[in-house]
Amino acid sequence: MNKALEIIEAVWLLGIDVDKIDVLIHPESVVHSMVEFVDGSVIAQLGTPDMCVPIQYALTYPKRVKGIAERVKFEELGSLTFEAPNLEVFRSLELGIKVAREGGSAPVVFNGANEAAVEAFLAGQIKFTSIMAFVERCVDEHEVSLCVTLEELLEADAWARRKVGGLVSHKSIS
């Protein structure tokens, strides 16, 4: 789900075409991002699998300050592996790409439904493995509006949260 939301962020915050974004599975979690340039060269941002540095940088931007994260020990790292995601396993990724392409209110419903389903899981109301079913149902049943105002986006978010709440209370998804 996190990668799906990052795709949506890249599309909407950075104006990157969804078809120019690739996701790779990287089990070591050392490479956090890569940018490929028109000449074929790639620049990567590497760090320990820890969110301390990104959070610190968000708080201290544009400065870089000494932090608490461990340094990458390349000599101990061994190798870096990458593989294409299995979209049957990572269903949220495929759905995130779909809503990023659709645009309008679709990404808002995707996010709102996910947040509501995660809250239901944390409250012990649904199984972890059911989260995606709630998100998929909301996205499937939502009528996407492409020309949206802030008020319409807030209503789409509220609709998704209410929809998940109703599905949870009626035990519509197991």
Image (spheres, rainbow, N blue to C red):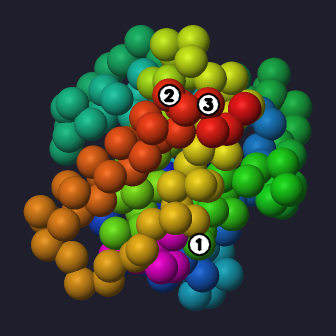
Residue at 77% from the left image edge and 44% from the top image edge: 26
As drawn, 26 above or below 29:
below
**How far is mark 3 from mark 2, CA to CA?**
5 Å
As drawn, 80 above or below 74:
below
Q: Which of marks 3 and 1 is nearer the N terminus?
A: 1
Magenta stretch?
A: 99-104
As drawn, 126 above or below 26:
above
Disc count in the image? 3
Q: Is residue 102 magenta?
A: yes
Number of the label disc, if any, that sits on residue 171: 3
Q: Do the residues labelled 3 and 2 touch (CB within 8 Å)?
A: yes
Residue 60 x, y percent position in the rendering: 19, 32
170 left or right of 8 in image: right
50 left or right of 11 in image: right
Q: Which of marks 1 and 2 is nearer the N terminus?
A: 1
Q: How crowded is mark 1: few (under 14 residues within 10 Å), some or many (20 or more)?
A: some
Which residue carries the number 1 mark? 98
**How far is mark 1 from mark 2, CA to CA?**
28 Å
Q: What element carries label 3?
A: loop
Number of the label disc, if any, that sits on residue 169: 2
What amino acid does circle 2 point to? Ser
Residue at 67% from the left image edge and 45% from the top image edge: 133
Q: Residues within 10 Å of mark 2 (few under 14, many from 20)?
A: few
